[in-house]
Image (cartoon, rainbow, N blue to C red):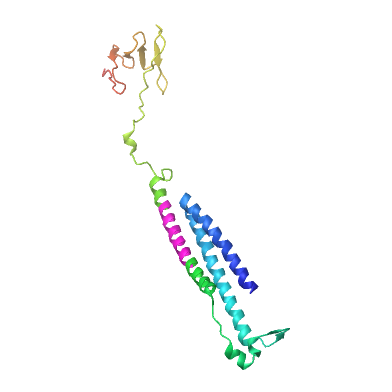
């Protein structure tokens, strides 16, 4: 009977652990806690079933196998016939509660397993939806401004009479001369052509006008 009580005590502890991990499932919605609760509840059901099996095993041995007499204790195998006929036996409510608790533990563990499966699938769907690091961009690169090979116009933030030159990336003489005397609307002088320089009013940054000569 000590084995019976030991298994019941272990089942009570594991069921308490399953209750605590179940609270964690409600708070965090994590599948790992649901899996842990599943393990604890099935362990509880297993311990309760072992306790009930040990109870039935001990009862069977005392009624049918043991013939020895220990002090004043006489087992049923050595009882006189009149004592056997006059004795009635029945199981109490605790016996029924033991099997009911085992069944309820199995049902609870099954529900926890379904919850873990659902939460794991939900997390997987969220990862596919919000994962932006492991996949390419949703937008084509042509939607973004392309890098121009033409040198940018250099704006001089200071009021100076000295012109500012923009040199070509390939070397050589400056291809553009910016008159910074007029703030806000710089004038672009095209010096790349061999003819006369052409004054260009650059009103937009992405519009360039070149001298065809």
* Quarter in which the N terminus is drawn: bottom right
- 162 to the left or right of 83: left
- Where's residue 65, x and y in %? 63, 87
Q: Residue most toward the right? A: 71
Asked if residue 127 is positioned above or below residue 65 in the image, the reply reads: above
Residue at left 52%, top 58%?
A: 19
- Where's residue 93, x and y in %? 52, 73
Q: Nearer the viewer, residue 127 or 176?
A: 127
Residue at left 37%, top 41%?
A: 137
The answer to which image quadrant residue 210 occupies is top left
Magenta span: chief secondary structure: helix
Asked if residue 8 is positioned above or below residue 162 in the image, the reply reads: below
Magenta segment: 106-123
- Where's residue 35, x and y in %? 50, 59
Q: Residue most toward the bottom? A: 81
- Where's residue 205, x and y in %? 31, 21
- 25 to the left or right of 57: left
Asked if residue 126 is positioned above or below residue 36 in the image, the reply reads: above
> Is residue 115 magenta-colored?
yes
Label total for image: 0
Q: Nearer the viewer, residue 136 or 18?
A: 18
- 169 to the left or right of 102: left
Residue at left 66%, top 90%?
A: 78
* Quarter in which the C terminus is drawn: top left
> Is residue 119 magenta-colored?
yes
The answer to which image quadrant residue 50 occupies is bottom right
Residue at left 54%, top 75%?
A: 92
Q: Residue most toward the top? A: 161
């Amino acid at each position: 009977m000590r084995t019976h009580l030991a298994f019941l005590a272990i089942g009570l502890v594991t069921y308490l652990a399953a209750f605590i991990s179940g609270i964690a499932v409600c708070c965090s919605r994590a599948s790992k806690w649901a899996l842990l609760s599943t393990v604890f509840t099935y362990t509880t059901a297993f311990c309760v079933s072992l306790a009930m099996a040990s109870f039935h095993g001990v009862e069977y041995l005392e009624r049918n196998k043991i013939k020895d007499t220990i002090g004043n204790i006489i087992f049923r195998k050595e009882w006189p016939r009149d004592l056997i006929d006059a004795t009635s036996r029945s199981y109490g409510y605790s016996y029924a509660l033991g099997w009911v608790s085992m069944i309820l533990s199995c049902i609870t563990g099954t529900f926890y397993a379904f919850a873990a499966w659902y939460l794991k699938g939900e997390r997987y769907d969220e990862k596919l939806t919000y994962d932006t690091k492991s996949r390419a961009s949703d937008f084509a690169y042509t939607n973004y401004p392309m890098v121009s090979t033409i040198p940018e116009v250099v704006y001089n933030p200071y009021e100076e009479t000295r012109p500012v030159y923009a040199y070509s990336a390939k070397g050589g003489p400056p291809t553009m001369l910016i008159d910074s005397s007029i703030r806000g609307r710089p004038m672009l002088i095209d010096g790349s052509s061999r003819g006369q320089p052409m004054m260009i009013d650059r009103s937009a940054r992405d519009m360039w006008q070149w001298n065809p000569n």
